[in-house]
Each structure stands twice: as structure tokens, then as C-alpha cells.
Image (cartoon, rainbow, N blue to C red):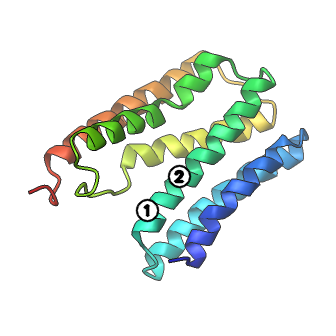
Amino acid sequence: MFTLSNVLSLVRGPLAFLFLINRIDVRAGVILAAVLTDCIDGYLARRYKYTSRLGAILDPLMDKFFVLFVLSVLFYERTLNGWEVVAMLSRDMVLFVFSLYLLIKNEWKTYNYRSLWWGKASTSLQFIVLFFLALNIHFTFILFFLFVALGLCVFLELFFTLKTNPEKG
């Protein structure tokens, strides 16, 4: 079902390609537009009960595509090095491994998918860091360890939700 909130999620896909324009104002605007569409689509989905399984998958998928695309551009331009990109993607790697676990255990259909608090914190931090990187403001390596810590928190949150998953027999 395509609702306004799902369309706003989809907008982040083509929006990412505008990051290829190597101008500070354009890049900062692209990041801000991605943040706004992410906030507004979530608000609309909850406010008008547009929530759906498609939206629950589409929204984080578009977030991940957007972040991965922008990180790839910054890595290609040597603004970020490899370990910084990997650190920023710690949460996503945890989610990938968890998804593989659900597939192997054949529990992906019955798992109660929901947003994760630490996942939202990680996404917010990713967007904040990307915004400042778009402005050519760089961070100390310590900030990137925070992404690894958030990835560990997501792992723990997933582990505990798996143990208390109500849809599991």
C-alpha cells in the first residue's frame, strides 16, 4: 500500500544521488531533506495510522540506502577512511547478521519487526555526522567508536527482543 509516508520514504533514494553534486550547500541541503522526510514519514504513519509492513521495511531500507550511498561518496572522495565507514555501519552489520540468523532459523516470517531505540539513536547520529561532514567539519576518531558502541547496543536490544518475541510460539 503506497501512502504519503511511504512515498516520502522512497524520496530518500533519488535524493541520495544529489549528494554527487560536490557543493557544500547542496550536500547539506540533501542531508537536511533526508532527515525531514524521515521525520515526517514517521509522524504521518503514526498520526494517521498509515503503518504497514511495507512501511516498516521501506523506511529503514531507504535510510540505509541513503546513508550507504553518502558514505560511499565520502569514502571515494577520501573524506572518510575505511574503518570510519565500517564504524558508522556497525549497527547495519549487526542487523544484517541478525537477519541471517532469522533466515537460518526460519523465524523471519514470525518475528515481530519493530523499530529499535538504539537503532534510531544510531540513525540520528549518522545523519548528524553526515551533515557536518557535508559542511567539511571532521571529527576525532573517538566519535566513530560511539557508532561501534551503538552497534553493540542494537545487538543487545535484538537479543532481548528475540527472547521476548510475542509472536514466537
Above or below, 2 against 87 in this view is below
The residue to which callout 1 is attached is 56
The single residue placed furthest to the bottom in the displayed view is: 48
Q: Where does residue 91 sit, x and y in percent of width and height?
A: 45, 35
Q: Residue at x 80, y 44 (%)?
A: 19
Which residue occupies the foreground of this view, 111 or 8?
111
Above or below, 83 against 14 in this view is above
Q: Residue at x 91, y 41 (%)?
A: 23
Q: Where does residue 147 sit, x and y in percent of width and height?
A: 49, 29
The answer to whether 51 appears left or right of 138 in the picture is left
- Find residue 61 and name its label: 2
Q: Where does residue 7 sit, x and y in percent of width and height?
A: 63, 71
Q: Where does residue 13 sit, x and y in percent of width and height?
A: 68, 55
Quadrant housing residue 98: top left
The amino acid pointed to by label 1 is Ala
Above or below, 91 against 44 in this view is above
Disc 1 element: helix
Position of the C terminus, as image quadrant, is bottom left
The amino acid pointed to by label 2 is Leu
Quadrant housing residue 166: bottom left
The single residue placed furthest to the left in the displayed view is: 169
The answer to whether 163 appears left or right of 37 in the picture is left
Q: Residue at x 61, y 25 (%)?
A: 85
Which residue occupies the foreground of this view, 164 or 144?
164
Measured Cα–Cα span from mark 2 to mark 1: 9 Å
Disc 2 element: helix
- The numbered mark, 2 or 1, whose residue comes first in the sequence reads 1
Above or below, 40 against 81 in this view is below
The answer to whether 58 appears left or right of 110 in the picture is right
Q: Around disc 2, counting alpha carbons within 10 Å, would you say few (fewer than 14), some (14 to 19), or many (20 or more)?
A: some
